Image (cartoon, rainbow, N blue to C red):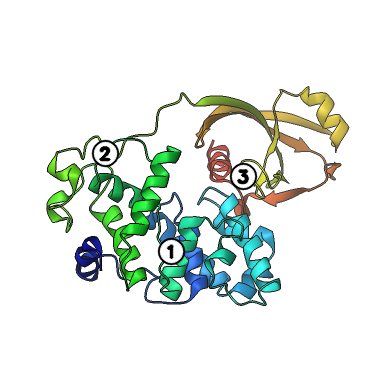
Amino acid sequence: MSLISNQLIPWQKKFGRNNLPWQGTKNPYFIWVSEIMLQQTQVKTVLPYYQKFMKAFPDIKTLALANENEVMKLWSGLGYYARARNLHESAKIIHNKFKGEFPSKFIDLISLPGIGRSSAGAICSFAYNQKTPILDGNVKRVFTRIYGIKDWAGILSVEKALWGLAEENLPESKFGKYNQALMDLGATLCKKKEPHCSKCPLNKTCKSFLYKWTNVIPAPKPKKEKLIQVSYFYIFQYKTKFLFIKKPKKGIWGGLWSFLEFKKELNIEKWVSDNFEVKNFKLLRDGIMTTAFTHYKLQMNYQHFELKGSNIKISLPGSIWQDKDQIQKGAYPAPIKKLVKELLVN
């Protein structure tokens, strides 16, 4: 074993996270779903989503044959929705191409949508005890601190060097336990802010601890001013139902249901007369709501209209009327659910 694994594996057994629902199993499906959910998302956030998701889709076949809307509904609020679409698409590939057997080869795993090098390495080591490295955000932080790397880990040359260190530090056995220990160390002790260095099993050899660099390592991502994008949302309500349209698979909130959205403000009277058969409509309220994404902020200028008439007809393909009581449980983006709550309270 390497020096790092000699210290980490016993530490993890005693102090690591050992009671999570996807642990204590060699089932690659359970491990895969957890790995995808945990990408850029904290464990405490993932837990309730994971439990509901696995209850609905307990195996590859169930997920592969599921309706996309059901998959997106259970992912709603977890964010980064491309993960859910890729998970669903990969399940179909495994069901059809691999005859329902979860791939055990790294090269096959990395060919699936949404599975990168680190996720494939985690699945191979946890499910099959293969000698594969991992390099998620927690592990990057551990290695940059141990080796005193002051450059941002997102730089291509730095990331390449970190992969080299991940390979070099692999032990000769217990690969899954070692990788779990690395993840746990980053998540529980080697935190971004205020790390618990005194409790760390690697503090005697960690350059950042020895030279007091923990406040500057890891280096932050170079700041860019977030761009603000502006969209106009038109909310139509008929009695207790709201009008929604399905978002394209590519782009924000892909595959979810949202209010009608346009990049330019509409001539609303003409648009309504072109698309609805209604007696009349009135503006109930308007406002602005802002939501943040990884690379930009979205300014949502919205107008909420009530439609009047005994029989509302609409000529918008792919649209649905949804009762207000069903929205919070459905496949809708979290900001849209929040906006609906505000509209119903006011």
Kind of residue at badge 2: Ile
* x, y percent for residue 87: 59, 60
Mark 3 surroundings within 10 Å by alpha-carbon count, few (fewer than 14), some (14 through 19), many (20 or more): many
Q: Which mark is residue 217?
A: 2
The residue at the point 49 percent across, 37 percent down is: 294
Kind of residue at badge 1: Ala
N-term-proximal mark, 3 vs 1: 1
Q: Which of marks 2 and 3 is in front?
A: 2
Mark 2 surroundings within 10 Å by alpha-carbon count, few (fewer than 14), some (14 through 19), many (20 or more): many
The residue at the point 53 percent across, 42 percent down is: 338
> Taking the image as drawn, is residue 37 in sight?
no
Choose top left, top right, bottom left or bottom right for residue 125. bottom left
Kind of residue at badge 3: Trp
Q: Distance between the residues labelled 3 and 1?
A: 27 Å
Q: Which of 198 and 169 is in front in this view?
A: 169
- The residue that disc 1 covers is 122
Q: Residue 253 carries which label?
A: 3
> Taking the image as drawn, is residue 3 in sight?
yes
The reply, left or right, for residue 311 in relation to residue 252 is right
Q: Look at the image and tell me in which quarter the C terminus lies.
A: top right
Q: Which of 315 and 222 is in front in this view?
A: 222
